[in-house]
């Protein structure tokens, strides 16, 4: 079991050495287990989300991923997250929470430098969906926004402002609001003139 937990840092180290040999500078991001706010399948959701985030973020150019698998490292505390990132030798740490509400879900993440001087500040990124299955495709955009922030190419203001929804998300939200307005905006009953 111990050898398994050392494997990702070893693989990451080899990948970083190969990137350095080719002149590429890579930034390492530790992905902590997600805090799950749901009644069912907490371990399954925590592990699945971390795996999907690690996979997508690891595909971003210039990013190396260290997956922290110890569930005790799940936190929403900034300093605890930074300490966990330092413990595995990462430059950045990604942490946050998953909340299940009815059929919908929300993933609220923060990306912060492990050592703050000279780096962009914390960045909050969230995605939500009306159906839990709709959240999964949106993880690609989350990984892209994390990579842009870590690499210093983030167009969003520093200080953690949430990313604006993608146009397709805005279109979906607009469609839902219009449908609700049509249902709730029935014409008032006609009144007889006095």
Image (cartoon, grey):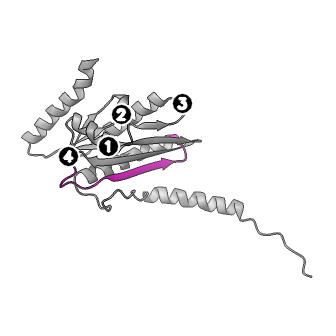
Q: Earlier in the sequence, mark 3 or mark 2?
A: 3
The Cα atoms of the two marked residues, 1 and 2, are separated by: 13 Å
The Cα atoms of the two marked residues, 2 and 4, are separated by: 19 Å
User: Which residue is disc 4 drawn over?
Assistant: 62
Where residue 35 appears, x then y in whole percent? 43, 37
The one of 44 and 76 positioned closer to us in this rendering: 76
The quarter of the picture where the C terminus appears is bottom right
Q: Earlier in the sequence, mark 1 or mark 3?
A: 3
The Cα atoms of the two marked residues, 1 and 3, are separated by: 24 Å
Which residue is the extreme one toward the top? 1
Mark 1 neighbour class, 10 Å CA radius: few under 14, some 14 to 19, many 20 or more: many
* Residue at the image position 49 percent from the left and 44 percent from the top: 134
Where residue 87 appears, x then y in whole percent? 23, 34
The quarter of the picture where the N terminus appears is top left
The one of 16 and 5 positioned closer to us in this rendering: 5
Label number found at residue 74: none
Q: Earlier in the sequence, mark 3 or mark 4?
A: 3
* Residue at the image position 8 percent from the left and 45 percent from the top: 23
Bounds of the magenta segment? 115-132
User: Which residue is disc 3 drawn over?
Assistant: 40
Mark 3 neighbour class, 10 Å CA radius: few under 14, some 14 to 19, many 20 or more: few
Disc 3 to disc 4: CB gap under 8 Å: no
* Residue at the image position 36 percent from the left and 43 percent from the top: 77
The Cα atoms of the two marked residues, 3 and 2, are separated by: 18 Å
User: Which residue is disc 1 drawn over?
Assistant: 94
Disc 2 to disc 4: CB gap under 8 Å: no
- Tag nearer the camera, 3 or 4: 3
Where residue 130 appears, x then y in whole percent? 55, 47
User: Which residue is disc 2 drawn over?
Assistant: 51
Considering the numbered disc 1 on the image, is that residue within a helix, a strand or a loop? strand
Q: Earlier in the sequence, mark 4 or mark 1?
A: 4
């Amino acid at each position: 079991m111990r050898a398994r937990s050392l494997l990702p840092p070893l693989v990451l180290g080899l990948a970083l050495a190969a990137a350095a040999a080719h002149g590429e500078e890579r930034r390492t991001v530790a992905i902590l287990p997600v805090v799950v706010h749901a009644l069912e399948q907490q371990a399954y959701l925590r592990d699945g989300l971390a795996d999907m985030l690690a996979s997508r973020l690891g595909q971003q150019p210039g990013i190396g991923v260290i997956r922290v698998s110890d569930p005790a490292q799940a936190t929403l505390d900034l300093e605890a997250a930074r300490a966990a990132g330092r413990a595995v030798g990462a430059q950045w740490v990604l942490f946050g929470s998953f909340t299940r509400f009815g059929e919908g879900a929300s993933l609220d993440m923060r990306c912060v430098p492990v050592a703050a001087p000279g780096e962009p500040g914390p960045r909050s990124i969230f995605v939500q969906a009306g159906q839990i299955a709709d959240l999964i495709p949106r993880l690609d955009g989350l990984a892209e926004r994390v990579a842009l922030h870590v690499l210093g190419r983030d167009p969003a203001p520093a200080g953690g402002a949430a990313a604006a929804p993608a146009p397709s998300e805005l279109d979906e939200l607009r469609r839902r609001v219009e449908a609700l307005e049509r249902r709730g905006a029935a014409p008032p009953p006609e009144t007889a003139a006095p």
